[in-house]
Image: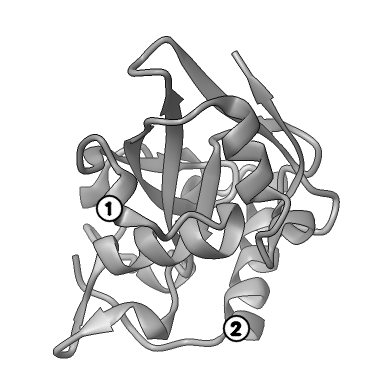
Amino acid sequence: ISTYKSDFFTSRVFASIYQELRAQGHKISKIEKLEQFTGGEYNYSPFLAGVAATTFVVLYGGHSIVLAERSEYITSEQRKWHYSMDEGFTQTDYEEGKPSFIKCFWRGLKEELNIDDVQSLSEPPKFMDLVFHRNVFELEFTSLFYYPKSFEDFKANYNRAKDRHLETYGLYEV
């Protein structure tokens, strides 16, 4: 994956332009494949300003998962059911000049869920798919994170997370 430097304001401007084009039925809103971003006569890659690490937290060795209801303070999909954690990739998530999605993942667990005790993990995270969300024109790489403690322990950590109210309205065990 190639990346480019930007800032939050610029990404929001491109997101706003995309929403206007989408509302008008522009062909950018019909993109389904990665090849369509830069293939042919158009280059839509500047519109891909958002990349995120999204994670379902799995509890009790696989017997339940944590769902999050998105906060009203986020920029899209407010108050909808979502992954347990959704952390946007930033310039701090680089190692040796290259994007590090594992660094983004760990930062998200710490900032959104207050999980940083990697010694307590029963197993490392499992990274799965790269997902394109056409409604917001963003990429997400998905993962499963196995948290070996109870939902009550998980929520106690979450209640001390610095970004909890900015990101989520609440957490639910399913």
Using a 10 Å C-alpha cutoff, classify the residue at mark 1 as few (fewer than 14 neighbours), some (14 to 19) or many (20 or more).
few
**Residue 119: numbered disc:** 1
Vertical position of residue 18 compared to residue 148: above or below: below
Amino acid type of the residue that numbered disc 1 sits on in the rendered structure: Gln
Q: Nearer the viewer, residue 46 or 66?
A: 66
- Give the position of the C terminus as an image quadrant: top right
In the visual, does 5 lie left or right of 85? left
Q: Nearer the viewer, residue 64 or 9?
A: 64
Asked which quadrant contains residue 19, the reply is bottom right
- Give the position of the N terminus as an image quadrant: bottom left
Amino acid type of the residue that numbered disc 2 sits on in the rendered structure: Thr
Q: Nearer the viewer, mark 1 or mark 2?
A: 1
In the visual, does 127 lie left or right of 80? left
Disc with the residue nearer the chain's start (1 vs 2) = 2
Q: CA distance from mark 1 to mark 2?
A: 38 Å
Asked which quadrant contains residue 164, the reply is bottom right
Picture coordinates of residue 44, whole percent (x, y)? 39, 65
Which residue is painted at 41% across and 18% down in the image?
A: 60
Picture coordinates of residue 155, whole percent (x, y)? 66, 39
In the visual, does 171 lie left or right of 57? right
Q: Nearer the viewer, residue 136 or 63?
A: 63
Vertical position of residue 135 compared to residue 139: above or below: above
Vertical position of residue 13 compared to residue 139: above or below: below
**Marks 1 and 2 close (CB-CB < 8 Å):** no
Picture coordinates of residue 27, whole percent (x, y)? 49, 46
Which residue is painted at 79% across and 48% down in the image?
A: 71
**Residue 139: numbered disc:** none
Q: For the residue labelled by badge 1, is the local secondary structure a helix, a strand or a loop?
A: helix
Q: How is this picture coloured?
A: one colour
Q: Nearer the viewer, residue 127 or 121?
A: 121
Which residue is painted at 70% across and 65% down in the image?
A: 16
**Residue 10: numbered disc:** 2
